[in-house]
Image: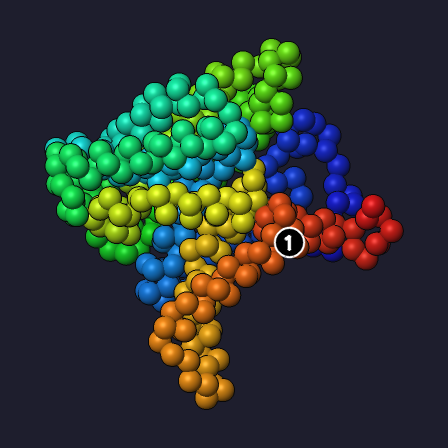
């Protein structure tokens, strides 16, 4: 009933290729946008700054990683290093007097440059060899950032990020920082939505499915893989910079270590490869679910009068969290985005079940 297709007629290509051709989709997107815009006045300060804001930034990074993994079909185990390049470059550029807007673009550009240079060598191999090559990028950048004082200040050092100045105005309030993160997340989402309809998006899908078959029909697979790495690296670099200036307010090598790359990869897989809404779901699940499970278990233990030790309480939520990931992937191996799509497709023909074949 919510997603009824009956009575909807597309009489031109523009209507058929619309981002949201079904009216219910447009209503839902409008409602979510209104909620996002009014969130500073409808949710608590804690929820805004500790949950919504980081979710927006990590979703942007997940979308960037999904571009290279989900659309181009290339492994990338060093995405946190790409974010670190953008973060450190932006902080140093902003401290040098470059306006924040240009510093962010410079950070994304530096991440793109290093990502493309590394991709020239890494894309000579495929599969697990490519995965190990991108993992090498992570380890190399970890060592360089940690051991070059001009970048990070040395091993274990913390580089403070100056207060953000947007369009020349100081931006210190959590509401203003939230809107910066929201704007970047919406911009990346809009870019990814339009990417599916472009020649670039179709070429990337062709390369993902069979690169040698794509070459037969005139798609230069190596060129498009480089474009995918460059675009993904730019999104990752800017996302790293936005994360530092809106959430962490300081940058350390540990914030972009190899475990962060693994978490980003988990966000993509749990959400669904090449799924835009899945990237939102996956980032929210990996980022927010562990804390919620911990709170729920602690509340349940107190309600039942059970005595759970500190060590058990520290590890039990992670076990439940891991089990939930396994259950979700068993139910729908293509991720939460596909699970949402299944529900949506069901509602399109409900209650006429005979049409679902």
In the drawing, does residue 19 fall left or right of residue 141?
Answer: right
Residue 271 on image: x %, y %: 54, 48
260 w.r.t. 218: above or below: below
Left-right relation of 7 to 307: right
Position of residue 353 measured from the top left corner of the image (x, y, whole percent) = 84, 54
Q: What residue sits 78% from the left and 43% below the top?
A: 7
* Residue at left offset 37%, top offset 47%: 259
Given residues 254 and 98, the one toward you in this image is 254
Q: Which residue is mark 1?
A: 330
Q: Quadrant of residue 50?
A: bottom left
Q: Going by the picture, which residue comes out furthest to the bottom?
A: 305
Q: Residue at x 84, y 54 (%)?
A: 352
When the figure is inspected, residue 203 is found, relative to residue 153, above or below; the finding is: above
Vertical side of 264 occupied by 208: above or below: above
Closer-to-camera residue (69/148): 148
Mark 1 crowd level (few <14, some 14–19, many ≥20, 10 Å Cα): few
Residue at 78%, 55% in the rendered image: 350
Relative to the observer, which residue lies in front, 265 or 311? 311
- Can the viewer see residue 325 in this picture? yes
The quadrant where residue 141 appears: top left
> In terms of secondary structure, where does tag 1 sit?
helix
Q: Quadrant of the N terminus?
A: bottom right
Q: How many marks?
A: 1
| 342 lies above or below 113 | below
Q: Nearer the viewer, residue 319 or 85?
A: 319
Q: Where is residue 170 shown, x and y percent of the image?
A: 18, 46
Q: Does residue 280 appear anywhere in the picture?
A: no
Tell which residue pokes out farthest to the right in this image.
354
Display colour scheme: rainbow
């Amino acid at each position: 009933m919510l997603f009824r297709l009956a009575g909807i007629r597309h009489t031109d290509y523009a209507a058929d290729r619309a981002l949201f051709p079904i009216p219910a989709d447009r209503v839902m997107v409008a409602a979510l946008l209104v909620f996002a815009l009014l969130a500073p006045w409808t949710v608590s300060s804690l929820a805004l700054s500790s949950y919504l804001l980081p979710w927006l930034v990590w979703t942007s990074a997940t979308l960037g990683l999904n571009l290279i993994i989900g659309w181009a079909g290339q492994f990338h185990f060093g995405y946190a290093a790409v974010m670190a390049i953008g973060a450190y470059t932006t902080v140093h550029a902003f401290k040098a007097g470059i306006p924040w807007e240009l510093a962010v673009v410079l950070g994304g550009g530096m991440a793109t440059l290093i990502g493309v240079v590394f991709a020239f060598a890494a894309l000579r191999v495929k599969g697990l060899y490519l995965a190990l090559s991108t993992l090498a990028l992570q380890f190399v950048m970890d060592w360089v950032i940690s051991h070059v004082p001009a970048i990070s200040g040395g091993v274990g050092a913390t580089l403070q990020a100056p207060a953000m100045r947007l369009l020349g105005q100081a931006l210190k309030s959590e509401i203003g920082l939230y809107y910066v993160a929201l704007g970047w997340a919406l911009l990346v989402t809009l870019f990814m939505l339009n990417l599916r309809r472009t020649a670039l998006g179709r070429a990337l899908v062709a390369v993902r499915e069979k690169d040698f078959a794509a070459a037969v029909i005139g798609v230069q697979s190596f060129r498009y893989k480089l474009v995918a790495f460059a675009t993904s690296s730019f999104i990752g670099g800017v996302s790293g910079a936005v994360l530092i200036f809106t959430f962490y307010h300081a940058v350390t090598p540990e914030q972009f270590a190899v475990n962060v790359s693994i978490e980003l990869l988990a966000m993509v897989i749990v959400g669904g490869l090449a799924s835009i809404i899945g990237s939102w779901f996956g980032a929210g699940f990996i980022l927010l679910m562990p804390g919620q499970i911990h709170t729920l278990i602690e509340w349940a233990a107190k309600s039942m009068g059970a005595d759970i030790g500190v060590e058990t309480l520290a590890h039990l939520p992670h076990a439940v969290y891991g089990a939930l990931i396994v259950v979700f992937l068993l139910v729908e191996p293509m991720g939460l985005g596909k699970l949402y799509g299944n529900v949506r497709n069901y509602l399109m023909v409900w209650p006429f079940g005979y049409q679902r074949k």
